[in-house]
Image (tube, rainbow, N blue to C red):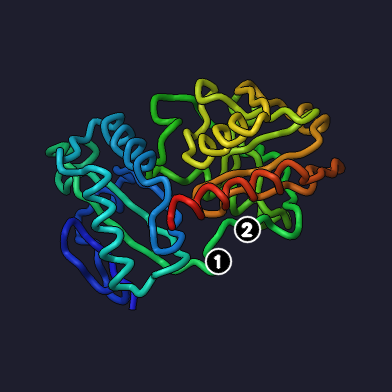
Amino acid sequence: MLYVNNNGSILTGDAPTILPGNRAYLYGDGVFESIRIINGQPLNLENHVLRLLAGARAIHMRPSASYTTDFFEAKILELCALSAISEGGRCRLSLDRISGGAYLPDANDSTYYIEVYPYEVNHFELNARGLELDIYQEIKLQKNVLSNFKTKMGLPYVMAALSAKANGLDDVFLTDVKGQILETSSCNMFIIGNGVLYTPGLDEGCLAGTMRMQVINLAIANGIKVYECAILPQNLMAADEVFLTNAIRGINWVGGYRTKRYQNNISRKLVVLLNAYWEKATQ
């Protein structure tokens, strides 16, 4: 049995747990984080909570002063214990504006919602087959004050993921109106040329991914240069490697973009470094 925590109420996950009038359901009025669990421990939680709270303030919510890393860690560990998740898992942590009002809210206080699920492996694992991607053309991302946060206004990413599936692809790159590649339907992206990592900068309007930042830090700590810059489709054709990052899957290497094929040498090295880091941190 899996359990959820709806603003302090522990509920079983096999029945409705969201109340009528929930503004995240009605208007996408909330922010969330996806958190990987290894050895029963939520990873990188401090950075997840920092981004969650910053995103809440960006949409003018007022998070409770009690919403600290320690507060959410205790709540997540409680759910993991109840749900018998002692090894691999994943968690979704949400803040939603309290019910009331239509597009104009009645108030800006927030509620939290936590759900946990088992995950099939208890480490980060590089995909055996390289992913196949192309560029999604139908919807362009618009840079704004919310671009770096995980809000619940997810339709562009849903549409991109549906397009990838319809075209027999594993994912698609999303671009802005200038044609710069920012991310995919669920990941940040990196390209590698001559042993150097390049990734879209936060100023370009990509998601401020927690795994993105960890990979940047791991690379720099191990002598790999990293540059944040604009990425254009022609850069994909010149790259030696391309890989994607997110908090749950870690690092996934891209095998091909149209007719271009890629290696995975540095991607494999980074997965080893990532696992070594979290194995030590969760022991």
- Judging by the rendered image, the residue that carries numbered circle 1 is 121
> Which quadrant would the C terminus be assigned to in this image?
bottom left
Vertical placement of residue 230 versus 161, above or below: above
Image coords of residue 125 (percent x, y): 63, 58
Circle 1 residues within 10 Å: few <14, some 14–19, many ≥20: few
Specify whether residue 175 is in view: no
Q: Position of residue 19 (x, y in %)?
A: 20, 61
Q: Quadrant of the N terminus?
A: bottom left
Amino acid under label 1? Val
Horizontal side of 215 relative to 58 (left or right) equals: right
Few, some or many C-alpha atoms within 10 Å of disc 2 (few <14, some 14-19, many ≥20)?
A: some
In the image, residue 120 above or below residue 6: below
Q: Amino acid at mark 2?
A: Glu
Q: Residue 167: which quarter of the image?
A: bottom right
Q: Which mark is residue 264?
A: none
Task: Please state if 37 lies on the left or on the right of 246 as rendered.
Answer: left
Relative to 20, is 93 on the left or the right?
Answer: right
Pick the residue in front: 172 or 265. 265
User: Residue 90: x, y in percent?
Assistant: 43, 60
Residue 169 seen in render: yes
User: What residue did someone put label 2 on?
Assistant: 125
